[in-house]
Image (spheres, coloured by chain):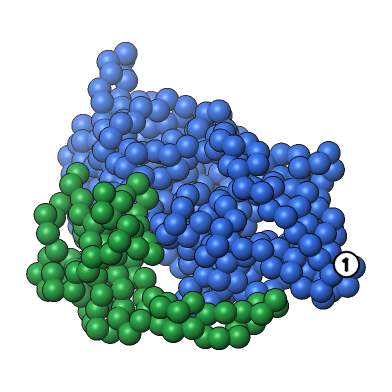
Chain colours: A blue, B green
Amino acid sequence: MANTFKFGNGNWAVKEDYALAYNDENGNFKPLPFDFTRASTATRVNKDGLIETVPSGKPRIDFTDNTSGHLLLEPSRENKFPYSNQKVSGGLETFTSGTASITVTNNYATSPDGSQNAMRFQATCGSTSSDQTGLRDALSMSAASATLSFYGKSNTSSSQTIAFHFNGGTKTVVTLTNEWQRFTYTDTSGTTNNAGVEIRGTYTDTDVDVLLFGFQMEQASYATSYIPTSGSTVTRSGETCSGAGNSTVFNDSEGVLFVEMAALDNQGSATSTVISINDGTSSNRIHLFYFVADNTIYANYRSGGTTRSTAEFTLSNTANVNKFAYKWKSGDFALWVNGVEVDTDTNTTMISSDTLDELDFYAGGGGANFYGKTKDLRVYNTALSDSELQALTSN
Amino acid sequence: MKHLFRKYEFDSKEQAESKIAALPHETDEDGNEYPTHSHTVVKLGFLPIVEPTFDDEGNVVDEGEYSTKYSVDVLWSELDESPYGWKSYEISVEGNGVHTFAGWSFNG
């Protein structure tokens, strides 16, 4: 078997407007670069586990929860908090109701970005449900799905509970430990959303000392990477990654597309998010894509403008990292997921030779941008055996 | 890649949305429209002139006051100036105004 296209798997090379895939058959290294676009800066978690800003146009290799990294591709998003990381007039401000007191100290402790810019949140309240205090901002929103997120950590030796404050009300209670964690809450927003965190008698601990960082409100059903703000709301531009490879590394008549990846969301938007080998059009292409609304991974093979073969499998959670392999060969199509063959097909109508010439993180011809985390992506120019596919996709 | 940050105020939401809808786009085989441009368009909407006020429970006490103009920020790609039909709605603001793009200063 020949692995003619490699990307990731711990071997990353990126620079402005560029992410490197390659072919190293027989020890001969041939670069197969992707073109990358993002008009704004963005943040990632680096190898040291710290949040850092990445310049515009540079792909993000993100190390959240892993040491080998993944290419992070996200849609455009706006952080609706004008001050994401400080108590300030016109931004996050304290509020109290009933018996309660609160002190918030800006720039008190080291935050997940490694700077001394985490807030200290010290608060006490009485034991009734009307005793309440917290930190919030009145955000202008649309009456639609929205996701509030923040980083939190206990400032004592014990875990402590606080609650999300959303649409002016008490929502999910979360436990802050001695490790920084990011917490998220999704719900339908009002057109004005008083949002932040709080403690409240009968709901949370009533005497807390915790550290907070990186408040973010997005008008969407899931959270994306942190967007720092300081005085105005801020939008991170969407990303595209496309145009890698050529007709010599893709075999139209047989091969395997292998990807180890995760979607950004589970059971969320009804939008396809596609990885595609194609000829620059929607007529001839091999697709592997999530349809997150029904938690399904799909694969299909299309020639001459007609879909010839399809395969699909419902996942337990599209936001988990899974290993997928789609095999195409006349009379022998199959989709493998995490070591198991989950769907097969016997199509015999194939794409003409030397047609497929690029790999894109969007549908052939455009649209359905892939947003997710890609740890490893490979293309083989032969149809692998079942034992090889099982080994390739097993964890 | 070259980019251009501009702010706009339109007479209505419908006017803004018609301008945005007229930007290059195509329709896939499933009937879904997708943009073929790489501009980043942010609908800021009717911005507050007087902020609303709330009681301790988060209930609205005063609705505040909102602009009658519909605001949109755009980070244009590969353009030196606003495209046809947008130029007359450009505005200037101090600093970044209420919104900016990550890593960008409006008056920088």
Residue A331 seen:
no
Read off the residue under disc 1.
A126
Residue nearest the observer in this picture, A196 or A126: A126
User: Does residue B18 sit above or below A215 in this rendering?
Assistant: below
Q: Is residue A363 left or right of residue A131?
A: left
Q: Is residue A19 visible?
A: yes
Q: Quadrant of the C terminus of chain A?
A: top right
Residue at 70% of width from left, 76% of height from top? B56
- Pointer 1 indicates a residue of which chain? A
Identity of the residue drawn at 53% across and 54% down: A84
> In the rendering, at what x and y percent does residue A246 appear?
21, 35
Residue at image point 32% right, 20% down: A24
Q: Residues within 10 Å of mark 1 (few under 14, many from 20)?
A: many
Q: Which three-letter amino acid code belongs to the residue tagged 1?
A: Gly
The residue lying furthest to the top in this view is A27
Residue B30 drawn above or below residue A154: below
